[in-house]
Amino acid sequence: MALRERVVAFVEEGHTHRAAAARFRVSVKFVNDMIILKRETGGLKPRPQGNCGGHGKLGRLQDWIRARMDGRPDLTLDDLVLAIADAHQLTVHRVSVWRALRSLGLTHKKRPASRRAKAA
């Protein structure tokens, strides 16, 4: 935060963005972004990153997915993709379904992990 404040103050004193970048050893884009952030929000606090989860297509279907997997734990990702398409008229990629399962703490493995062979 201190660097952000010093960079913006330097530019507000009348210096160019390039001069601020050179003086504080940051990129010109960083300086530009800080000036835009200050103008738009009035502060220099970093914006939140990511989408905080649960906002994608499958966010509203989490309870449905959990119930479906509880009822039939042997479903494959492809089976779930087809079930979502049939039940909710939603086209999703199997990776999206995998991420939803992972966020719910569910697994889609069909068999338990096998034991490794002992070294000879």
Image (cartoon, rainbow, N blue to C red):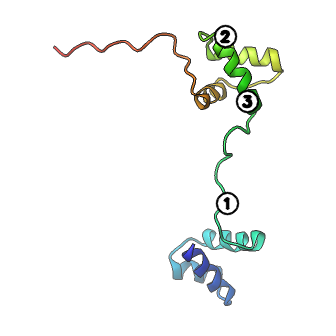
How far across and down, in percent of the image, does residue 87 sit?
81, 16
Quick check: 103 above or below 38? above
Closer to viewer: mark 2 or mark 3: 2
Closer to viewer: mark 2 or mark 1: 2
Identity of the amino acid at label 1? Arg
User: Who is closer to the viewer here, 93 or 117?
Assistant: 117
Q: Which residue is mark 3?
A: 58
How far across and down, in percent of the image, does residue 6 sit?
58, 81
Identity of the amino acid at label 3? Leu
Q: Quadrant of residue 79?
A: top right
User: Who is closer to the viewer here, 96 or 41?
Assistant: 41
Q: CA distance from mark 2 to mark 1?
A: 41 Å
- CA neighbours of label 1 inside 10 A, class few (<14), some (14 to 19), many (20+): few
Identity of the amino acid at label 2? Gly
Q: Which residue is mark 2?
A: 71
Q: Quadrant of residue 116?
A: top left
